[in-house]
Structure formats: structure tokens, C-alpha cells
Amino acid sequence: SQKKKGRDRRVSEPGIIKGSRKRLRKAKNIIRSHEDFFMVYDNKHWATARNICFWFSILSILGSIVAAGILIVLMPRSCDPETMWWQGKVILDIIPTNSTSGQPKLNLTDLILSVPKFKEIGIQAIKLKDIYRHNPDDGNDTLSNDSDWYSCADDEVLRSRLDVNLLSTLSQELHKHDMNLMVEIPAFEESSSSGMMSLSLIQNVTKAIKNWGEVGVDGISIVGLEHFGKDPYIATTAASWKINFLKYGTSPKHKDSHYSVPFATKY
């Protein structure tokens, strides 16, 4: 009988241990979920961690407020970035009109007297356009071809249409009112089979750029270059014209050269 009781005790012992372990885990879960657990087991490390988190949050909020204040103070009061005089400005095209004699004329005297009025209504620059065109007052605004233009080296055409002695006065009056002067220069000739621009045309345009630069124009607009799309050196030629304009131009303002839209789009 004693042997039987010993066997019963050995069989029942694992069950007692297993049940005790379950009750112990349950008790631990109850203690950890109790609201007094962290108060009982709290120590200096937990206190330090809480202080660090608290002050870090406070400093972050204060830093954000200070940074926002600085950005508000430094924020520009208006969105008006600095641009070149031809960017986003109003440019008035002036073309020769038929006079009583039937010849196209450009009255520079009246134009000079009108500069203050142009400035008052917001015009930034004046562009002398179609000066070398056969019929500038025909209402046709297309570039057309070489047969519609005189050579830019033809000084007689220029002198017959405006008083060249007043060009310097016009540029000075415009600069006095913080305005600018542009001129249109044609680069047209009968196209060759190779599509190359002739040396004579290159020299004529260079001469015209020099002459207009010396009277104080701020910008030149060269039209007709799109007809020389097959010329592999056309971009180099245009770059040399720009250098010559900067070299011989007498305007105290920023000088720049512009080209017709088809040429600019291609190159």
C-alpha cells in the first residue's frame, strides 16, 4: 500500500507544478497590468527617460515656433524677381509709315517727344521694325523672303526713311527714362544650292550691327536666319555677331541679340 501511495504522489506532482506555473504567469500579468506597477517598480532611469522625452517635446515645439517666426519675417513682401529688360516687358514696334510723298518715313522727332508718354503707360522698349523692308506699311507681318527686303548695308534706304543723326538722341532719351532701344536687321539673300550663307551677307550684317551699336541701341533682332538651316556654321556666325555687338555697342545698359522664332526654335 505504501508503494501505491508513492506512485500516486509521483503521478500527481507534475500536475501540481503545471498548475502552479499557470497561476504564477496569470499573477504576473495581473501585476503588470495594474496601475500601480510602474509606481512600485519605478527607478531613476525611468525618471530620466521621462524628463528627456518631456523636454525634447517642449524644445521641439518652441523651435518650430521660432523657425516659423523667422521664416515669416524673412518672407519676401512681393514676388518680383529681377529680370532682363526684354523679359516680360512691353516692347512697342515702330515701323515706317507712308508719308504724303508716298515714301515710308519714320519721324524720329515726334518719337523722341513721345518717350515720356510711352514710359508713363508702361512701355519698356521701342523696336524699330521693318526699316529695310520694301513695303513696311502694307499690313503684312510675315518675314517672307529676300525679294521683300533691301540689304541691311544699304545706307541710302536708311537715310531716306529716317534722320540717322537723331538716332543717338533717341537712344539717350530712352536711357534717360530707363527705357531701351531695339532694331531689326534683315539677313536675307537668294539661297544657294548648298544653303550656306555668303561671306558678303555675313559682312553686311556685321557692318549693320556695328553701325547700330555705335548709336546706342540695346538690342538687335536679326531676322531671316531660318533660311540658312543647312549651313552648319550658322550658329557660329550668329555667336560672332553677338560678340561684335557687345564689342562695338556704346549703350551703358545690358546688350543682347535676338533671332527670329523659327531659328531660335531650331538652334
Image (spheres, rainbow, N blue to C red):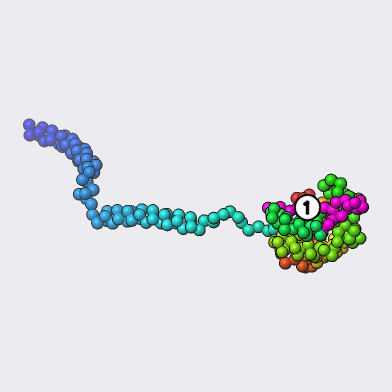
Asked whether 182 or 71 is in front, the reply is 182
What is the crowding at mark 1: few (fewer than 14 residues within 10 Å), some, or many (at least 20)? Answer: some
Give the mark count. Answer: 1
Relative vertical location of residue 103 with respect to residue 9 in this rendering, above or below: below
Residue 49 visible to the viewer: no
Please tell me whether residue 103 belongs to the stretch shown in magenta.
yes
Residue 47, position in %: x, y?
26, 55
Quarter location, residue 152? bottom right
Query: Which residue is pictured at 10% across the width and 32% down the height?
Result: 4
In the image, what residue occupies the spot 21% across and 49% down? Answer: 39
Residue 33, percent from left and from top: 24, 42
Report the front residue among 213 and 48.
Answer: 213
* Identity, as a three-letter code, of the amino acid under mark 1: Asp
Query: In the visual, does 58 lie left or right of 171?
Result: left
From the image, tell me which residue sits under label 1.
93
Q: Toward which corner of the image does residue 18 lie, by quadrant?
A: top left
Q: How far from the left and from the top, in percent, is residue 94?
A: 80, 53
State the SS at label 1. Answer: strand
Quarter of the image for residue 188 reads: bottom right
Question: Left or right: where does residue 158 sit relative to residue 235?
Answer: right
Magenta-colored stretch includes residue 105 = yes
In the picture, measured across the screen, residue 231 lies left or right of residue 76, that is right
Q: Magenta segment range?
A: 86-108
